Structures are given as structure tokens and as C-alpha cells.
Image (cartoon, coloured by chain):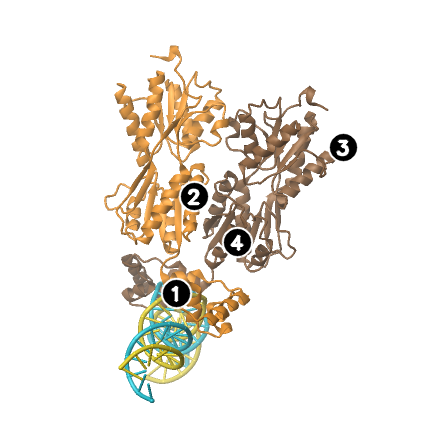
Chain colours: A brown, B orange, C cyan, D yellow
Amino acid sequence: MANATIKDVARRAGVSIATVSRVLNKSAAVRDDLVQRVNQAIEDLGYYPNSIARTLKNDNSKTVGFVVSDIANEFFSGMVRSVEDVLNRHGYNLFVCSTDGDRTRESSYLSLLREKQVDGIIINVSGKNDELITNISNQLPVALFSRKVPCANFRGDFVDNDNFSGIVALTNHLLELGHRRIGLINGQSYLSTATERLEGFRSAMRTAGITVDEEYPYLYNGNFNRVSSGGDGAKALYEKGATALIAANNLLALGALQFCHEQHLLLPEQLSLCCFGRISNLDLLYIRPTCIEQYPAAMGARLAELIIERIESKNTLLNREIRFPTLLLPGNGTGAPRADSLS
Amino acid sequence: MANATIKDVARRAGVSIATVSRVLNKSAAVRDDLVQRVNQAIEDLGYYPNSIARTLKNDNSKTVGFVVSDIANEFFSGMVRSVEDVLNRHGYNLFVCSTDGDRTRESSYLSLLREKQVDGIIINVSGKNDELITNISNQLPVALFSRKVPCANFRGDFVDNDNFSGIVALTNHLLELGHRRIGLINGQSYLSTATERLEGFRSAMRTAGITVDEEYPYLYNGNFNRVSSGGDGAKALYEKGATALIAANNLLALGALQFCHEQHLLLPEQLSLCCFGRISNLDLLYIRPTCIEQYPAAMGARLAELIIERIESKNTLLNREIRFPTLLLPGNGTGAPRADSLS
DNA sequence: CGCCTCCGTGAAAAGGTTTACAAATGCATC
DNA sequence: GATGCATTTGTAAACCTTTTCACGGAGGCG
């Protein structure tokens, strides 16, 4: 039994389909008794509008795509909920797409979303499809988060933490404890998140009289999306003699934590660990790295608002950039270096 | 600049739109040189098909709705990723909808999904829209998880843990340690998850000679979706003198854990804690409740497969029920009760 | 050389909606 | 009762596809 259509409703109510449409959308005055009859017919038939047909006609799908590297990553899943809520409140639905930061997956999802006529796209870009994203951004509202697109003619909004000051706070925290051989476990160097965090690190270290250049031994570049990178980075830098580590995001931190756990390292006696990002159940961990807190829910809500504004303005807005302030949460995973490790 | 349509492609290639469609879908033979010209025109114009129009014509949207209480809950977010992957591999997209277990939100999302012509719905029902879900299930493929719909004419598939044996394992674990005053922090009693877990508990206790009926003092009914319920339950049952607690899902467990943490309870000396479900970063917690492990990724993948089969069979399949086996993960949060607490 | 078959192509309808435009109705006024 | 205007209603086109059907041409066969 196929769904009733507006035609069926019209016939049953003894009016034209235009009248039914007007009743449905309240788009024009309709005589009271006809409204009654139409509503009765709708109820009788269990009619509900076909929003696909509506989209075809109206050229808006009331749908937004949310493209992230991995929706199962708690940072993104914390975000998606608030994105969803804000969108829903404005009558929009949400498509989720996980790319694993993979170029091909990302571009194929983007094609799919365009074919599905989404009204806008929220995306943390992989960093490998910059021209494509830039093109899309000139046809369709786009809001980025966490990772910028470096093209001049990119059009759209951007939301992120204040990476620079966050990493400066972490670095200073370690410096104040007396550390000098501070390691940074970073993500892919072609991502703005990584470069900004590296810049912050470099700046804080320079102020302390330490030069972080290509020769600096305590830098590790891994992959933001892989917990294993965090473990590899922690191992490499610890073995080189770093006395403290900064993990540049939550997943890298988790890997580093697991490394310490497996190696039975005593924190902070043998190693200090801190990170940029939120780790779930932090309060309940036996080692609690000092963290830069993040606000995924607030960021998601802001992104949703930005994209809706951009959709409703028909993508005419100027580019906007929102930075969330950072907050240092001291944990028991950082402390003074051991005396014998000071060089 | 609006998107090119199939008409534009046809004009540029000097063929009819039917031919373009045939090239796009490879639905019929087309002369080689025409195929070339069409493809060239597609590239020149940057044409991509409008899948909304396609849906209207073909009556399938290649879209599935995923309706859960809270996508930010790590159990569901672990699931959604594998649902997404399997669906995507079959050319489907995913709408996510969080209901908070609220009846109104649930039914409004369901309406929205139907209007958007989704091909199928995966849902963990709130338990308050049984007739609606049953109706929908007779028109549209539906796969449930975690919570059954008790209506006889419900049509669709069901996936869950083997709740009964899981809770029996937990209960026996505590009984073997010597506990008798075992508390159960459960969720809403109108949900199959809750009743099945209660049944398992009751059965294991009966075998040990303890009757769990309305008079049994160590039962607490909270809300599966609220961490705070877990805390409230833990407080209430601990104060009544329970020596061990079972939290019936991950969120309730988290609340209970936090209660213990805040009260500085020594586990397992003052209280034993175990739970049904997975807690993130379990390895790294200083108190690790004994847990029944869950497999959200595997459950999600299975759900996706079930719904696709059901979609492609046009909802003609018999109802299927898949139970995932349970595995007990011993933690340091459970131990023998203190001698002075044995009654 | 004529006929039939087969293959490739195009014209047009259909899918469910919205909306511009035309038609019809209702009412007041003279 | 005719006229004019304002309000309500209906008709039909449009949105972009897919697909049925009919047509035309090429090739094979008698």
C-alpha cells in the first residue's frame, strides 16, 4: 500500500491539489470549511507530505552533511549531538559521514552529499582535498572546524580552539615545573591544527631560550586519527630522553597514556604527560594528564548556527572565524622532572 | 550558478536526455562515440546527478535513519560508525536522530524520516511509541536494537546482547565472592532490556536461595539514559547496606563509579561494583568494575546488514532475532565483602 | 530486392509537490 | 439587476529524473 499523495487528499476532500497544498503550508487563505475537509481527508488517509518532491520543487532539502574523520571518536560524537539538536530545532536533518581522514572517502562523501542536494556541509577536512572543498564552498554553504583550508578564495566559516594559546599554556606549565627536554607528539604537518600547535610550542620554548627547529630532537609527527601514533610517538620521544610529553590531541594522548600504562612507567616521576583535548572519564583515571579542556558540544552548536545562517543568507556572508578559549586542567600526570634527568 | 542538469548535458552532447540517462546508469547499450560525447559534456559542465529527482522517480532514497536515545553516548557512537560503514559500502547514507528516549522527539523524528522517504529505520525504541513503531514496521523496513517492541504484529529484526546470561554471569561472580546483599541498578521497567536483565538477576539469585521480589530491598529503577540515575541508585542501595552493586548499563555504571569516587569509597573493600556494558578507557581507570563486555561495532554492522537485506527484499523477510554472546571482564572493583558486613 | 529482426535512439509520460496565472465566486455599491 | 473589486479556487507548468514505447536504420535472409 503506497502512501497517499496530495492528489488523493484533494480528491477525497473534493478540492484541487493547490488548495491542499495551501492548507498544508498555510501559504494562502483558504475558506474555513475547506480547511476542515482537507484536514479530515489527511487524517483519514494517513497522508504525510513527500519531502523529496518538495525538495525537488523548492530547491532546499533541509538537510546538512556532517563530515568528520571518525564519528566514533568521542570528540566528534560529542559534537554531533549538539549539531543535530540545533539543526533539528530549525527543521534540518543531519547526514553523518566518517572519512578516516582519507582523501578518497572524503571526496566520495562530498559527491554523495551534493547529489543528495544537502543545503550545507560541516566538515573537518582531511587536508588533501583543498581545491575541491574550495570549489564546493563557492556553490554551497560550508563550515569548517579544527582544520583550515588554506585557499584564498575559500568561502565559509571556521571554528576551532585557540590552539596557539592552549599549547603555550601547556608548554609553560611544563617549563615551570622545570622541564627542558619537552616532546611534542603532533599530527599531520599539513593540517592547520598541527601547524598552529607547533607554532605555539615553538613560541613558548623560544621564550624559555630553547630553539625548536628541524634539529630539535623531541618532535614526533604522527596521525591525529590514530591512537597507535600516540603510542609510537611516546615511545620514540621517551627513549630519546624527553622528560615530558605533550600530545597534540585526544587520540594521540590516549595512545601515549596506554604506552605509559603498558610500560608501567611511573607518572610523573619517570615522565610527565599532558595533552590538548579531552579524555573521557578523566576524573577516574589513575594517571590524569594535565589537559587543555575542549568544548565539543559548544563548538558543535556554534557550527550548526553558523551553517544555518549561511544557508539562509544564501552563502553571501563574509567568512567568519570563531576561536574557543582554552582552559588548563591540571592533572596528576605532570610534575617536576627527576633530578638526575636534568641536563 | 545552478547545477547543470541532464538536459544541459544532453544539449551539449547533442543527444537526447534518455541517452544521457542510459550512459549514467549503464542501463542500456549506447554507441561508443555517443558515450564519449556524453562523458565529455558531463566533465565540461561539472554535472552530477540530482539524486532527489532520482528518488522521486525510483521510489528509493538510498537513505536509512538511525534513531537512538543519544548519539553522544559512547555505546551508540561506537555503533553508528559501523552502521555508517556498512551502509555506505552498499550505497546508502545515514540520518542520525537522538531522541533522549523522549516520546515526542521520537515520534517527530519518525515522521520526519518518513517524509524524507528513508528506505529503512534502525532504532532503539523509547518504549513509548509501540503502536506507532509497529505500524511503521509494516510499511517500512525496521531493525530494532537493545529494546524490543512487544506487539505481536511488529515486523522487523532485533539485535541485542544475551542479557539474561550476561547478568547471570555478573550475579554469579558476586555470589561466588560471598556477596548476598547484591543491589541492581536498573533502567526503565517498561524496556525489554531492563526486564531481561532483572529476570537474569532474579534467576541467578534464586539459584543461590535468595528471593528477589517486590520486597527485595536492593533494587533501584532509574533511567538508562541518565548518568545521574547511576549515582542516585548507588547512593540509595549503598546506604541500605548492599555490599555489591550491578549497574545495568554503561551510563548507570558511570554514575555509580562517580558516586564511589566522590564519596572516596574504597573498592572493593567497602563496595563491589560491576556492570553490564563497556566503559571507555577502562584499562586506565583506578577502579575497574568487573564488566560484561559489549560489541557495539559488531552490533552496528549486523544491524546494517539486516536492514539492507530487509530493504532489498521489500520487507518480506520473517522477523529475525540476533543475540550477541557476553563476555565477563574481571576488574579490580569487585572482591569479597568485608567480614563484618556479612549478615 | 523486399522483408524481418535487432539494435540504438528519441519523445513523452510519470513521480509528488509548489506556484504563477487564470477563472470563479462573493459581496458591496449604484 | 448590473458592475466592479476583492477574495478564494483551480489549472497547468515546472523541478530533474527514469523508462516505456515507437521509430528509424542496418544487416541478414530468402
Q: In terms of sequence position, does the residue under pointer 1 or pointer 2 come before the other?
A: 1
Q: Residues within 10 Å of mark 4 (few under 14, many from 20)?
A: some
Q: Amino acid at mark 2?
A: Ser
Judge if badges 2 and 4 mark residues of a common chain.
no
Q: Residue at x 58, y 23 (%)?
A: A265
Q: Which of B278/B131 is in front?
A: B278
Task: Tell whether A238 sits left or right of A308.
Answer: right
Task: Tell whether B87 sits left or right of A248.
Answer: left
Q: Position of residue A48 (x, y in %)?
A: 34, 57
Kindly identify which numbered label has been placed on residue A209: 3
Residue at the spot of label 2 = B82
Of helix, strand and loop, which one carries label 2? Answer: helix
Label 2, label 4: how far apart the Cα atoms are: 19 Å
Label 3, label 2: how far apart the Cα atoms are: 48 Å
Q: Residue furthest left?
A: B152
Residue at the spot of label 4 = A107
Q: Residue at x 26, y 18 (%)?
A: B209
